[in-house]
Every structure is written in structure tokens, then in C-alpha cells.
Amino acid sequence: MSEVLVKDIPCEELVLGTILDSGKIYDHVLETLDDDCFYDGMHLGVWQAMAEVKKKGENIDIITVTAELAREGSTIQPHEVMGLASKNLVSTVYIDNYTSRLKDLSLRRRLWRLGQKLVNAGLAETEEVEDIQQLATEELNGLFDKAEGTFTLTDALVKLLNIISNNMTKGAITGTPTGFRKLDEKGGLHGSDLIIIAGETSQGKSSMALSIANNVIQSGEKCAFLSLEMTKEQLAARLVAIRSGVPANTIMYDGNMNTSQLFAIDSAKGSLPGENLYFDERGTISLETILLSIRMMVMKYGIKGAFVDYLQILNVNSRNNGYTREQAMGDASRRLKNLAKELNIWIVALSQLSRNQQDPVPSLARLRDSGQIAEAADVVMLVYRPEYYNRTFPHPFEYLTDEEVKGKAMIDVAKGRNIGVFKFLVEFNAETTHFHDIDNGESVFEQMPVEEDAPF
């Protein structure tokens, strides 16, 4: 017995009849309806004829639509078009209720068809699991894609004025606050951006990401932290360490903590907004798993962004034997960027830098495995703690003494698609692996005058 798909033929008749009666409403219903919304073959033919009439700049009515059907050699007869126009028409005031129903039914039919594809794929081994997963993801994305991606300059100007208004109302932070003044002066973390935090081993990439995550959740926004190296308990211990001052290793492994430490940990635990941060630590986690996890958390929990720690140990699926590690990292970065843009969230991905014992000062050229990482990113921040190498800071902070270098790090925004490039200093607490702003004012900060990727 064949399946009977959901449909509402009388509703299709009412909508088409109303358009034939009042052709001007076509532009309005076009925002909701498409070919898939009409299950009946005759109704679909009339709807497509209306589209052709509109393309020619003519008014949609019984005469023009009937004439168009005749030109096409359609089997739909004039009396059938007349029959639609004679149905009980719905007021144009309530047309949205009926168009929404047709859209809902079309989505349900598409879901059924997708389900059949997945059932068939599950019964055979003719396709790779990754391909099936990608098919399902793409189909679902297209299924619930509301905006068709086409806007006028007027639309863009309205959005721009809203941004300006928000800037004037809220101050400089138009995105998600990071807790670092120099970054928040540039608007914080913006939806659709891919931000790379890079550094050599032991420079504090993960600590910088967790410091930002702590500030994000304290601001009231939700985010996810997907670590391929640390468990959720280890990540939680680091966050508690930031708030309590008790080192994470002590929290995790010391069975002889004193009363004041236990009290500080309990107080810190209570001050953390636990429902604002999500983890996903599934074993053998791959890029595909991460992309799906982020997508799910956006839909289910409304997260504003995600941290991925880190790129070089991602399992990037590829069946192409000629696929180099550089190409794999470039592909991973582009897919993270595309996901950020599609979901309008920010994604912070961590990346290693290749070692340079002669000159450990970080640079874009040392992004391990791929210069394509920097190409895909909107912002690249390089973390440098010269104290680790018994060195001093480079320009523009070379004036600091050896004593002043201790406990400090330089954040080099080496690429900033919309914010320019600049460097600033932060403090680093080695015990709690916590980065934070320097408290003694702006004198230790210096913005570089050169702006990368400037539009003019």
C-alpha cells in the first residue's frame, strides 16, 4: 500500500482563486509559497503560469493566466481556471494563514521524502556514511531556510541603521563581549565570524579561549566548548580556578585542600552560570561530528558561538588519497567559517603554530599545516608569552623591563577583516591559567595604525 502524503486541496484552491481575484497579492504570497506548496498537478500548473505572467510584467488575472496556459500548450482548460476563481475566496487580510498552511504541508512532504532516502540508505551499503550524513544536513538546511538570500540595498541600509542605533544605545559592544577591552572596543565577537587563536605549545591558546568563554557566559550569553584534549570535568575545573584562585590541578587531584580553598571553590561554583555553557566530548570526534553538534546546539539551546580546541587534531574525513594535511586544514577552516555564516554565530577555533627556536615571536606564516587557515578566518589572534622563553617583548612593547615582562602576554591581532590589526598586553596567571586585562590603564596598550583587509 502506497503512502498518502499530507495535502489540502481546498486550501490550494482558495489561495489560487484569491490571487486570480486580486493579482496584486501575488508578490506578498511569493515570500512564502513556491512550487512545492502545490500538491495537485493542475494547481501547480496554474501557479507556474502566474509566475510567467508576472515575469512579463502583466497583471495576474483569469484572462492573462488562461492565455499563458494556452501559449504553453497546457492541458489545463479555461473552465478549470474559471472554477478556481469562482471558489469561496479568502480575504487578503487572512491570506497568510492559508499560505502558511500550504508551506507547512510542503515541508512535511519533503521531510517524508528525505526520510525515505535515509531508510533506503540504511538498508544498503552503496553509499558512504559521511555522504549520507552530509545529504541529510544539506536537505534539512534547505528545508528550513527562510530567507532566499536575495536582498535590496534598501534592506541592507535598514539593517545598517539598526546597527548604528544599537551602537549608540549599547556602546561599542555590538557583538558578544570577550572581557578584554581592546577586543570589546571593536565590538566583541560578531555573528558569522571565524576567529582563530594561535600560539606555540604552552603559550596559552586554550587558556585564552576559556578566559573568553568565562566572560561570555558571565555576560548572560550561551556558548559551547568542544575540546578534543580535555574532558568536561577538566574544563569545569579551569573555569572554577578562574573564579576561585585555586589552581585547576589542585581542584582535580589534591585530596588535602584546606577549608578556605574548599569555601572558595564552592563560592566560585555557585557564581558560574552553569546553564550557559555546553560541552560535547564524544570519542573520536571528527569535523563532521563537531559541525553537527554546533548546529544542534544552536537549534536546541540557542548558543551564540562555539569554541573548537583545536584544529590540528581534528579528524577530517577524506577519501581522496591526494588530500594533503594543508588542504585538510584549509577545508576544515572554510567549513567552520561557512557554518558560522550560515547560522550567524561566531566560532573560535584554536590552532598551533610551528616552532621557531631562533625567533619564537608568532606570525601568520607559522600557522601549522596551512596558510589557508588564515585565509578563511575573519580574525587571527596570536598569543605570545616571552617569559616562557626568557625573552622580552617585541615592538611596540620592547621598552618593558625583564621584571615587567613577568606574568604578561601579548595578543597580536595579526588579521582583522573588519577590525584592523593591533597588539595589546594582558596579564596571565600561571597558577589558574587565566588571562585578564591589565588594570593600570591604557598606557600599556598600543594600537597599530595599519588596518588589514581594509575595503578601500
Image: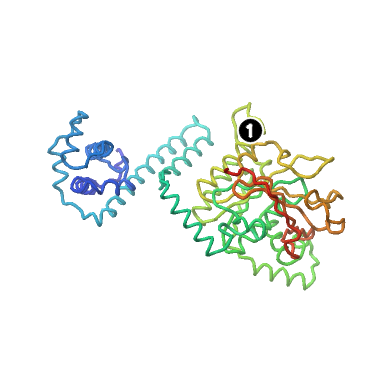
Picture residue at 81% right of the left edge, 67% below the top: 256
Q: Position of residue 217 (x, y in %)?
A: 61, 61
Q: Position of residue 142 (x, y in %)?
A: 43, 42
Q: Position of residue 30 (x, y in %)?
A: 31, 45
Q: Position of residue 133 (x, y in %)?
A: 51, 39
Q: Quadrant of the C terminus?
A: top right
Foreground of the two, 57 or 149: 57
Q: Is residue 283 visible?
A: yes
Q: Amino acid at mark 1?
A: Gln
Picture residue at 57% right of the left edge, 53% below the top: 190
Foreground of the two, 114 or 325: 325
Above-or-below relation of 448 to 217: above
Q: Quadrant of the N terminus?
A: top left
Above-or-below relation of 329 to 418: above
Above-or-below relation of 35 to 419: above
Residue 394 relative to residue 211: left or right: right
Residue 36 relative to residue 251: left or right: left
Residue holding disc 1:
327
